Image: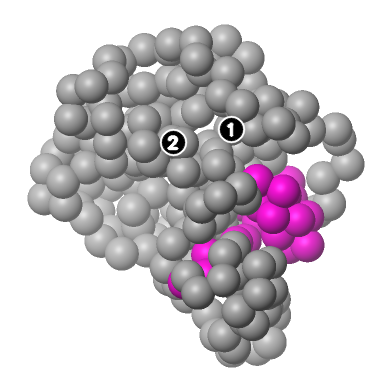
């Protein structure tokens, strides 16, 4: 499907259809390879720079990165950013020489007004376990977590359903917003992100993906898959 041809009302219908395919369930496998995904673009530009970084787990040492540049014309609308970002991430995913056990996406999973953030959208598209780890809240209600490392509080909707967790990855910094994307559950998503946090606020998979796509946008890195 060409997302560039969709209107926002058509995209809303598609999100509601994809929502029915989202599975939130505990991950039962062993994780040996994890990945982080992120996008970089200028807000009003039609060019997006997508990246997926592979890392060994639990060591969190980089294995390689896949980078793609793609033109998009779907408008920049909060709650619908997946329609700008997913096509490029799919191209980056297809360049990977091996698939990760779990993909961490810089963005939300089910913590979304229609339960269809980019991590859920992408997870359903590739039928693969995904987790959303976002820098800011998009949707939901929460109490501020304590200031200790790995303190957390639930992120809920108005009905009290738990959508994810608000996780303090470091003292004295803003929390991150963690939610299952697809084939993961709330507790397992939080535990995985906790295991991915090292010295920085952001978990290593998305932190390294963020760095890579920004270097790519600035011309320091080139398109394609490159071993680390």
Answer few, some or many: residues within 10 Å of disc 2's Cα (few below 14, many 20 plus, some between 14 and 19). Answer: many
The verdict on residue 5 being magenta is: no
User: What distance separates the C-alpha of mark 2 from that of mark 1?
Assistant: 9 Å
Front residue (pair 42, 157): 42
Pointer 1: what residue? 35
State yes or no: discs 2 and 1 in contact (Cβ < 8 Å): yes
At 36% from the left edge and 37% from the top edge, which residue is drawn? 211
Front residue (pair 133, 9): 133
Of marks 2 and 1, which one's residue comes earlier in the chain? 1
Tell me: 219 left or right of 141.
left
**SS of the residue under disc 2:** helix
Q: Position of residue 199 (x, y in %)?
A: 56, 50
Pointer 2: what residue? 209
Is 184 above or below relative to 92?
Answer: below
Q: Position of residue 155 (x, y in %)?
A: 62, 77
The verdict on residue 189 being magenta is: yes
Q: Quadrant of residue 60?
A: top right
Front residue (pair 3, 191): 191
Tell me: 138 left or right of 196.
left
At 26% from the left edge and 26% from the top edge, which residue is drawn? 216
Q: Position of residue 52 (x, y in %)?
A: 47, 29
Answer few, some or many: residues within 10 Å of disc 1's Cα (few below 14, many 20 plus, some between 14 and 19). Answer: many
Is 156 above or below relative to 93?
Answer: below
Magenta span of residues: 174-196
Q: Position of residue 53 (x, y in %)?
A: 50, 28
The answer to whether residue 90 shows anywhere in this view is no
Tell me: 45 left or right of 193.
left
């Amino acid at each position: 499907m060409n997302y560039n041809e969709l209107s926002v009302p058509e995209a809303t219908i598609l999100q509601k259809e994809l929502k029915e395919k989202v599975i939130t369930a505990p991950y039962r496998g062993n994780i040996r390879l994890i990945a982080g995904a992120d996008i970089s673009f200028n807000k009003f530009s039609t060019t997006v720079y997508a990246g997926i970084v592979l890392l060994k787990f639990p060591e969190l040492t980089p294995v390689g990165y896949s980078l793609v540049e793609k033109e998009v014309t779907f408008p920049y609308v909060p709650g619908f950013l997946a329609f700008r970002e997913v096509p490029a991430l799919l191209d980056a995913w297809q360049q990977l020489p091996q698939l990760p056990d779990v993909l961490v996406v810089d963005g939300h999973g089910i913590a979304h007004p229609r339960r269809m953030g980019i991590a859920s959208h992408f997870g359903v598209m590739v039928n693969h376990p995904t987790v959303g780890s976002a820098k800011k809240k998009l949707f939901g209600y929460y109490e501020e977590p304590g200031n200790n490392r790995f303190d957390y509080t639930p992120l809920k909707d108005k009905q009290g359903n738990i959508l994810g967790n608000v996780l303090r990855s470091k003292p004295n910094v803003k929390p991150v917003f963690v939610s299952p994307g697809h084939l993961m559950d709330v507790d397992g998503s939080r535990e995985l992100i906790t295991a991915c946090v090292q010295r920085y606020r952001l978990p290593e998979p998305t932190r390294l993906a963020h760095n890579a796509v920004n270097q790519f946008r600035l011309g320091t890195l080139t398109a394609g898959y490159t071993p680390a």
